[in-house]
Amino acid sequence: MVPFGARGADPRAGAWARQLARRLVDRFADDTALELRPVFLVAMPEASSEAGYLVFGSSPDPDLAARYASSLGATHALTATYREGDGRALDATLVDSATRREAARVTLPVPADALHELEPALASWIARSLAVTPSTEVTAPATANEASYAALLEAMDEEVNATLLRPSDAHRADDALRSALEGYLRSARADPASQICEERILVLAAESLERGAATHEVRALEELITLRPSSWRAHYVLGQLRAEAGDANGAIIAFEHAHSLHPLPDVDVVRLAELYANAGAIAPALAHLRRIPEASPAYGEAQELRAIVAFQRGDLETGRDAFARAIGAGTTSWELYASHGAALHAKGELADAAARYREALAAGAPSVVRLNLARVLLASGSRETALGELDTLLATERVGEAAGHAHRLRFGLRAPDLERELERAGQAALSGEAAALDDAARVFERALAVEPDLWEAHFGLGIVARQRADAAAAQAEFATVLELWPDQPDALHELGVALLMRDDTNAALRALDRAASLRPDDPAYVADAGFAHLRAGNLASARRHLERASGLDANDPITRSYIGELLRVESEAGKRPQ
């Protein structure tokens, strides 16, 4: 079957024709008596510098149509043209691939408000013409009315556009995807009982999960649920999208709705329990986990989560029982061993903690577990073994939080006296006393001679430079810290301050905004981000940040001075709040 062509003044006619052909393929997809396959025409370039493209919508002559059918091993080719003018109609032709001649021809009129009846009428004609009795129901309309069916076909066409544009034009692909989702929702609003629009929205949402790039799908699912509140699948996929987006509470609500409408598989119940546990709602998390039977394939995962929750709460006895059940069920994840190790570590059972951390590492745990193993070994008096673990960690991981802590721990083991001087030098640098800055800088330089990637020493040199009003040197040192530990909040904040000193407002704004997002409850970080927005002229954003900072600490004099400056600028701009 070749995608159908169209002739008419309505710009939607082409989409209707093309997607009517696709709907026919879908309609017969599960039929055992008759199989329809789509043929897509490809226009090949004449020169190597030109691109090829797909041709959607055509009405080839019988000979060419027969060749399309033969290429697929099909008995017939189906071509059609939807036309408007003196009324609406579809001219359809079946071509015998063996004789390359017309086997049947029909003109199906399309009365007003009856476009949705064209698809089953054409399906019935195909079956009669081929003397085939379909094994599935092919005569019922896909939707209850023309408005819903037209919106469905147009949405399907936009969906094809989104797929074709995605590799080359992400912006236009996104626009087409949004149009497709809006079209499916229009179709659902015109016929809330139709299953097809729900299916298409769910498919698009599932594809966005695979791509890891959901954009408009959450809103579409939310609106679909208002139209079809009993659709457990819509609630379920919405829960998945919200979970991927980090909206744990929203995901919990969606999964619970889905679960109330249709019991979820045990593996999804465990996932729901994990969302509860991560949100600090331990009681419902445990309630869900206790319902997972021992015969379930998800039993081991459920017991693992029960153990981890118990260990994190310091309940070693309950955690050990769940740990044993998880191990008995064949669960051996590094998280299970690491959480047990952390609980034992907190209780002072150092030998057992070290054993669990080693088991976690053998199961593929990240470097932070090796850091914790080194801490346990150090606490138990195994200094050289601890140093060996730190050397192993830093040999493979030089950047990040775990590496930053490992450098500091190794530095303390190699130079304990200098470590104490480093701590005093840090306090002296923050005090800003001119006489102490030179001594502090020398301590930081000595520390770097022992541990060149010690981020605290670079940070200290940055503070010294800022206290001396040397913004360029401060910027360089804080940038070095961020090379060693990307997204280190203190370094981001201080870098932003240094950039403000150099009047680099846009770069300062990015750094201070990021620092405030990492420390949302620190009034100084939020206030400084607000001041950067003020300097950039973003008065609404500045007000939001400064009001939040004031709510965190209403008596901070710097925040109050920033607010005073904001009021002055708003007044000059004629935007004084009422």
Image (cartoon, rainbow, N blue to C red):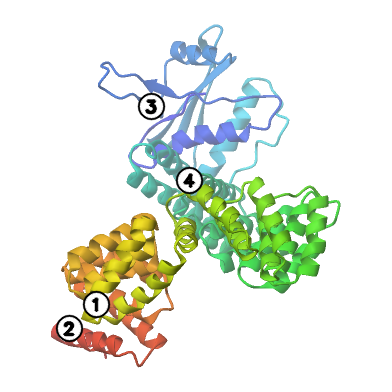
Tag 2 near tag 1, CB within 8 Å: yes
Real-space Cα distance between discs 4 and 2? 53 Å
The type of residue carrying mark 4 is: Ala
First reached walking from the N terminus: tag 4 or tag 2: 4
Real-space Cα distance between discs 3 and 4? 56 Å
Real-space Cα distance between discs 2 and 1? 8 Å
Between circles 3 and 2, the one closer to the viewer is 2
In the rendered image, residue 480, in percent from the top left (x then y), is placed at 31, 57
Give the residue pinned by disc 3. Answer: 55
Mark 1 element type: helix
Mark 4 element type: helix
Which residue does the image show at 58% across and 48% down from the upper left? 143
Q: Which mark is residue 569?
A: 2
Real-space Cα distance between discs 3 and 2? 58 Å
Quarter-wise, where is residue 232 in the image?
Answer: bottom right
The type of residue carrying mark 3 is: Val
Mark 2 element type: helix
First reached walking from the N terminus: tag 3 or tag 1: 3
Q: Is residue 439 left or right of residue 26?
A: left
Mark 3 closeness class: few <14, some 14–19, many ≥20 residues within 10 Å: few
Give the residue pinned by disc 1. Answer: 539
First reached walking from the N terminus: tag 3 or tag 4: 3
Tag 4 near tag 2, CB within 8 Å: no
Give the residue pinned by disc 4. Answer: 395
The type of residue carrying mark 2 is: Val
Q: Is residue 220 left or right of residue 357?
A: left
The one of 30 and 81 positioned closer to us in this rendering: 30
In the rendered image, residue 295, in percent from the top left (x then y), is placed at 86, 51
Between circles 3 and 4, the one closer to the viewer is 4
